[in-house]
Amino acid sequence: MLRGLLRGSSALVSGVRSPLARLSTRPPIPPVVNSAETASKIARWSLRLAHDNTFLSYHRNAMIATVAGAAMVQYRKGEGRPPLGAACLFAIGGFYMYIGSALYVYQAWRLRYTMRLRRSTLFFSTMHAAWPLTLWSIALACLLEETPTWLLTGLARVEAYLPRAIHRSLFLQSESLRPVVRMLAVIHAQETDRMRSGSTGRAFARLDLDGDGVVTYEQLKRARRKASAGSPRALSKEAGRYSLLHKLHEQIAGEGTVLTDLDYVVIIWHRLERLAALHSKLLPLAESGSVVAAEEALPILETLAHTVEQLEIALQAEIVRTHQVSFVPERWHRYFSREVQSLSDELVAVRALRRRCEAVKRDSELIL
């Protein structure tokens, strides 16, 4: 009898556990919601997702065309050919970039009630479409070597917070340009003295044929053309001021004569105007007291370095010519010839200026 009671109790317990176990494995019953409201919310979010995907598709196509155009620019630059194909790709990229941004803002405005967009959301959508377009335009301008001046001016105000690599590639210290300006002024003065001394000085003094004075390079060329016009016989019949021109015509007719003193005067005058123009451009940058945009200073330094290099070659040739026509031994020229001494001093200054220009350009390069 006891054994029967135990069997009945165990069967009762097992019968109670099995329904509980079955209940524990069933999924939870979802709460009852308004199906119309849920469907409307899902439709709005789907529309917004499609709206953003359309915007991203336009900009993705713009990026692909821009990258292809940039690669073609580098390829054509290596071949020395104009990148006309790159211009077409940049036009495609610009079309997708501008149309995609404008379409994104237009769709957001037209669908503002359908997607239930607030004014703050519309403002965010406008900014979301504007900032990639702005950065793309600036990047394209920098890629085409036309960095906006306002961008450099804005970066100069926060140059202390820029990373070192960006700062060194964008800006130069104005103090580094001051030695260049001072040496350039010294060389300009030395070239002026060279033009007004020696045989070139005598030729320059006789160029004032009309008594008006030679002030500009154009006046110098007109005076040279007037001196070179006419025959030596006609010039010899005039007053004594034309005697030097008669001798110059005879020198031109001689064998082995390539350049006369008048030609040297014209060359030096043109070089003086070039040096003066470079000095006028570098002086405000050197006296600014702040950082200078490398894109503004480096082209001037490149032109100055090329001009100084040509001047160095001319001075070396002039020293050799002076040695050939002098009766003093070459090793004593520097001590007994004032002309050779001035040429040597100017040559030393020119070489120092060329090294200074190279040093400033090297300082602007990226050092990792």
Image: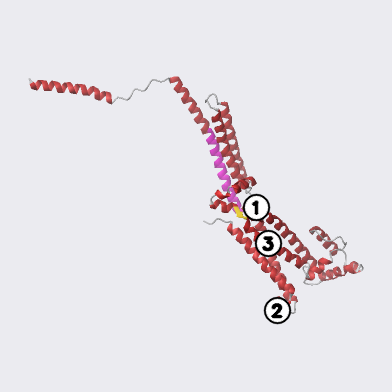
Query: Does the rendering let one see residue 143?
Result: no
Which of discs 2 and 3 lies nearer the camera? The answer is 3
The residue that appears at 58% across and 53% down in the rendered structure is: 169
Q: Position of residue 341 (x, y in %)?
A: 71, 73
In the image, which residues are magenta?
54-80
Q: Amino acid at mark 2?
A: Trp
Amino acid marked by disc 1: Glu
Q: Work out which quarter of the rendered image holds the N terminus and state it.
A: top left
Q: CA distance from mark 2 to mark 3?
A: 31 Å
* In-image side of 56 versus 234 (left or right): left
Q: Which residue is mark 3?
A: 182
From the viewer's perspective, is residue 30 above or below residue 259? above
Quarter of the image where one finds residue 110: top right
Left or right: 264 as drawn, with respect to 368: right
Q: Residues within 10 Å of mark 2 (few under 14, many from 20)?
A: few
Q: Which amino acid is tagged 3?
A: Arg
Mark 1: secondary structure: helix
Mark number displayed over residue 332 = 2
**Callout 3 secondary element:** helix
Q: Residues within 10 Å of mark 1 (few under 14, many from 20)?
A: some
Q: CA distance from mark 2 to mark 1?
A: 45 Å
Q: Could you say which quadrant of the image residue 314 lies in?
A: bottom right
From the top left corner, tell me how far across and down residue 242 is, in percent. 88, 67
Q: Chief secondary structure of the magenta span? A: helix
Q: Establish if 208 lies above or below 100.
A: below
Vertically, is 12 above or below 228?
above
Q: Which quadrant holds residue 14?
A: top left
Residue 259 place in picture, x, y as percent: 77, 67
Earlier residue among tags 2 and 1 = 1
Looking at the rendered structure, the secondary structure element under dot 2 is: helix
Residue 296 shows which numbered tag? 1
